[in-house]
Image (spheres, grey):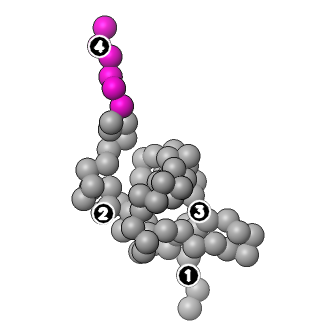
């Protein structure tokens, strides 16, 4: 069975985040183990369709929104 590989750029786009943000989640060990990327022959990170759906659900469950936690200044 062939597993579709979804690379970090597309994952980030689908999550409305930057690839750097997704990498930070990995480095800071914020992602649940089942949602961590796999590695291909080139050692590039990739996710499966099920994992991307899991990431989308994780963002909702954890209430992680773009820019959440950043101080905003009003002028």
Residue occupied by mark 4: 74
* SS for callout 4: loop
* Measured Cα–Cα span from mark 4 to mark 2: 31 Å
- Is 22 magenta? The answer is no
Quadrant including the C terminus: top left
> Where does the image place residue 61, in percent across and percent down from the top left?
24, 59
Residue that appears at 33% across and 26% down:
71
Q: Main secondary structure of the magenta part?
A: loop
Residue 53 as seen in the image, left or right of residue 25: left
Q: Reading the chain from its start, which is encountered first: label 2 or label 3? A: 3
Q: Residues within 10 Å of mark 3 (few under 14, many from 20)?
A: some
Residue occupied by mark 2: 57
Instruction: Give the farthest residue toward the front.
Output: 28
Q: Reading the chain from its start, which is encountered first: label 4 or label 2? A: 2
* Measured Cα–Cα span from mark 2 to mark 1: 21 Å
Residue occupied by mark 1: 3
Residue 19, above or below 46: above
> Where does the image place residue 72, in percent across and percent down from the top left?
32, 22
Q: Reading the chain from its start, which is encountered first: label 2 or label 1? A: 1
Residue that appears at 32% across and 44% down:
65
Residue contact between numbered discs 4 and 2, judged by CB atoms under 8 Å: no
The label shown at residue 7 is 3
- Give residue 59's quadrant in the image: bottom left
* Measured Cα–Cα span from mark 2 to mark 3: 18 Å
């Amino acid at each position: 069975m062939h597993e579709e590989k979804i690379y970090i750029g597309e994952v980030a786009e689908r999550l409305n985040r930057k690839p750097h943000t997704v990498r930070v989640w990995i480095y800071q060990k914020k992602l649940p183990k089942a949602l961590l990327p796999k590695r291909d022959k080139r050692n590039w990170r990739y996710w499966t369709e099920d994992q991307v759906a899991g990431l989308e659900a994780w963002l909702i469950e954890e209430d992680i929104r773009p820019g959440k936690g950043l101080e905003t200044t009003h002028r």
